[in-house]
Image: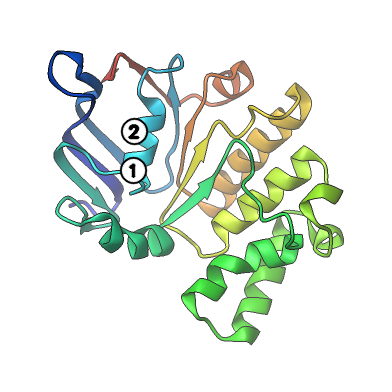
Amino acid sequence: MNESVVAKLTDVSKYYGNGEGRIAALDNISFNVKKGDFIVLAGLSGSGKSTLLHLLGCIDKPDKGQIIIDGQDTTMMNLEQLAPVRMEKIGFVFQSFNLVPVLTAYENVELPLLFKGLDRKKIKNRVNEILDELGLQERKGHFPGEMSGGQQQRVAIARALVTSPAIVLADEPTANLDSKTGADIVNLLVELNEKKNITVVLASHDSVVLDRIKNIVTIKDGKII
C-alpha cells in the first residue's frame, strides 16, 4: 500500500438484519484516506456515514471486503485483536464528548497514555504539551461539569491527539454545540490539520462543517455518490 494512504477500504459492505429484512448499511464501498487529508462524510441520518466511521475506527467489522489501517490489514482480526489497533493508530472525537465526569481535563487527556503504560514523566510532558497547543492549561484541573461544551470538546480533541494517532475520527463533533462554538471547533480541527498535518475524517450534516471543508464525500443509501 502507498505509504501516504492511512486507511484503505476495498469493496466493503455492512449488513443489518436477516433474510428479506436485511439492510445494506454500506454497499460495496471503496474509499481511501491519505496522510494529511481532511475529509467530511456527509449524508442524512441513516445514510451509512456513521457505520463507515465505525469501520474505519475498528469499532465494528465489515461483513465483506478489506480494511487496511496505517499499513495493517485488519480484515481477519476479531474485535479483541482490533483493540490495540484502535489504541495505537486511531483517535476518536464524539458528539457527546464522552469525557469521564470524575476526572479532570488533565486526567481525561492522560488516560490513553496510562493504558499504554508509558513512563510517568513522558506522560506528563506529552499531556501538558497537547493542553498548551489547544489552549487548555488554565482548565486542566477542572472537571467536565465545570467546563462549557466547547471546552469539553477541546479536551476530547486533546485526548484524541495525545497518542499521536495515524488518523482522527470525529462523529458529529459540533452537534451538541451552538453554531459559534461549533465553528470554533471546526476551525481548530482545520488548524491542526494544516499546521500539524493531522489526518481527519469527520462525519456530519452540519452546515457549519459543510461550508468550511471543501473535501466532502457524500453517502446515500450506503453508497458513495
The residue depicted at 84 percent of the width and 59 percent of the height is 142
Q: Position of residue 24 (x, y in %)?
A: 22, 21
* Secondary structure state at the residue bearing disc 2: helix
* Secondary structure state at the residue bearing disc 1: helix
195 sits to left or right of 74: right
Q: Which mark is residue 148?
A: none
Check disc 1 and report the residue beneath it. Answer: 56
Amino acid on which the number 2 mark rests in the picture: Leu
The image shows a total of numbered marks equal to 2
Amino acid on which the number 1 mark rests in the picture: Leu
Check disc 2 and report the residue beneath it. Answer: 52
Which quarter of the image is occupied by the C terminus?
Answer: top left
212 sits to left or right of 67: right
118, 39: nearer the viewer: 118
In this rendering, the answer to whether 146 lies above or below 29 is: below
User: Where, by quadrant of the figure, is residue 103 drawn?
Assistant: bottom right
The residue depicted at 74 percent of the width and 60 percent of the height is 102
Q: Where is residue 114 in the image (x, y as percent from the top left)?
A: 56, 75
User: Where, by quadrant of the figure, is residue 121 drawn?
Assistant: bottom right
43, 16: nearer the viewer: 16
> CA separation, marks 2 and 1?
6 Å
Do labels 2 and 1 touch, CB within 8 Å? yes
Q: Position of residue 2 (x, y in %)?
A: 21, 51
